[in-house]
Image: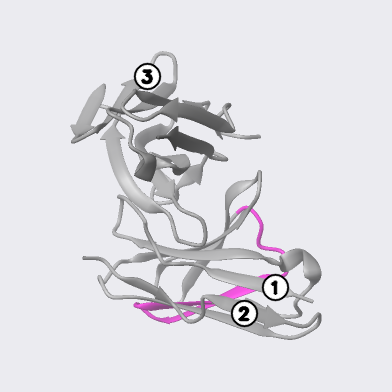
Amino acid sequence: DVKVTQSSRYLVKRTGEKVFLECVQDMDHENMFWYRQDPGLGLRLIYFSYDVKMKEKGDIPEGYSVSREKKERFSLILESASTNQTSMYLCASSARKGASFFGPGTRLTVL
Amino acid sequence: DQQVKQNSPSLSVQEGRISILNCDYTNSMFDYFLWYKKYPAEGPTFLISISSIKDKNEDGRFTVFLNKSAKHLSLHIVPSQPGDSAVYFCAAIGRGGSNYKLTFGKGTLLTVNP
């Protein structure tokens, strides 16, 4: 079974803090993704990576950056957290073209 | 511009009956479609997919139908069970370019009443 794990299920941070969200997959997938889910807006793609050290902006990259130093690990960084970044963050991975498999999500609250 | 649309935000069905969830798309480059199910506070779970070379794919109680000319797909759940109550997302992948990137609809909340 594909396993995608995320470093935290729940996180509370203060405005202006730097926030790291980590994701690890164990299926040797080339592609990894970061989404956020907000009520009424569905899943929106923040960033994705199709190879180590490669990244591409998704639909809403502003205020975020990513890092992929190893194939199995994809990190999302909020340089200076703001209250409008309070959301559910979901990491996913997939093989070249196929279904993405998601982690359990991180509920981030920025106060 | 929303390329994958789920026009019904919610659907309520009686246990044992059929649930039909609909999805429309606008991008003719999409050639692979997927359905995901999501419970609150959990990540989405892959349910079923269909390639554009097919018009139907079945897996147990779940069947996905694709009508390419209408750019429409639907997910049928028969019979519906209370445990099926969740948000269902339709997603699509396109040919060429970023052909591994999923484009999601906004989701439909299905409630199956006992």
Residue drawn at (79%, 76%) of the image: A111
Which residue is disc 3 drawn over? B68
Which residue is disc 1 drawn over? A109
Q: Which of the two residues, B49 or B71, is positioned nearer the viewer here?
A: B49
Q: In the picture, which quadrant includes the C terminus of chain B?
A: top left
The region drawn magenta spans A59-75
The amino acid type of the residue labelled 2 equals Leu
Disc number at residue A11?
Answer: 2
Q: Which of the two residues, B40 or A71, is positioned nearer the viewer here?
A: B40
For the residues tagged 1 and 2, is the chain the same? yes
Q: Which chain does the residue under circle 1 lie in?
A: A
The amino acid type of the residue labelled 3 equals Lys
- Closer to viewer: mark 3 or mark 1: 1
Q: CA distance from mark 2 to mark 3?
A: 43 Å
Q: Which chain does the residue under circle 2 lie in?
A: A
Q: CA distance from mark 3 to mark 1?
A: 41 Å
Q: Is residue B83 magenta?
A: no
* Local secondary structure at mark 2: strand
The amino acid type of the residue labelled 1 equals Thr
